[in-house]
Image (cartoon, helix red, strand yellow):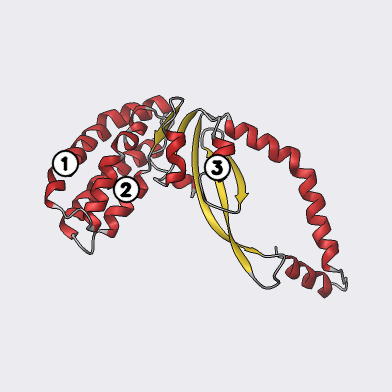
Amino acid sequence: MPIDRQLKRFSMLGVDLPPSTVESWQKLTAELLKPLHAAMRSEVRQAGYLQVDETSIAVQDRDKQGTTHKGFLWGYHAPLQKAVYFDYQKGRGQIHCRELLEDYTGYLQTDDYAAYHKHKERADVIGVACWAQARRNFEKALEHDRARASVAMQLIQQLYDVEREARDSNLTYEDRKELRLQKALPLLNTISKWMVRELPDVPPRSPMGKALRYAIRLWDQLIVYLYNGRIEIDNNLCL
């Protein structure tokens, strides 16, 4: 709750406090939480499977009252441990996630933002792409090429139907992998062949052309989830 709102609530109860007092409470509490924060950071870095995404937030500027600057909250989600580590940074560049990811090893699932490319290229990291992002690209193409975009979205929806079946059946990770190999693998083969067939007939700079090239370029990362039941089909849990 914003400090000014807290002050108003205290005032309604007949307690008038200076803003500096409440600010000091927050600072002292943050100091007490530092060991927990460090422990969460350590656990997430050793997770072996991370989903990462960054979100812009407006941050009040201390030097200019009433103004804000854009900051970024980087979220590092370890699905298997059900742990999330948030790291505030003033920017969105590669340097702002380097410290946490430079020694990380394992699966790394992100969108195609360039800041993650260097980490995914390392031999000790397995890059995983996000089917939700691939689907969004085809969704954007609906207005320009409804026929092709509809085909893509229907096929991708069937991939998600497999995931829903696994979730509703409460399958183990190994059983989820087997279900994917049985039902999702044929769908992925169909999607791959369809994209390669359609690509030459689509203008490269059109929304459909961009959607096709995005999925084809990241294909190896988009199918990683197929062979490991612990890996999610998309990065949505981190958004």
Q: Nearer the viewer, residue 165 or 59?
A: 59
Q: Which dot marks residue 196? A: 1
Left or right placement of residue 35 versus residue 201 in this view = right
Within 10 Å of disc 1 (Cα), the crowding (few <14, some 14-19, many 20+) is few
The image quarter in which residue 169 lies: top left
Residue placed under numbered mark 2 in the picture:
134
Looking at the image, do the residues carrying marks 1 and 2 touch, with CB atoms under 8 Å apart? no
Amino acid identity at mark 3: Cys
The image quarter in which residue 102 lies: top right
Please tell me which of labels 2 and 3 falls first in the chain: 3
Q: Between tags 2 and 3, which lies in front? A: 3
Where residue 90 appears, as percent x and y from the top left, is: 60, 54
Residue drawn at the location 20% of the way across and 38% of the way down: 192
Q: Nearer the viewer, residue 98 or 49?
A: 98
Q: Secondary structure at mark 2?
A: helix
Q: Secondary structure at mark 3?
A: helix
Within 10 Å of disc 2 (Cα), the crowding (few <14, some 14-19, many 20+) is many
Where residue 49 appears, as percent x and y from the top left, is: 49, 32
Residue placed under numbered mark 3 in the picture:
97
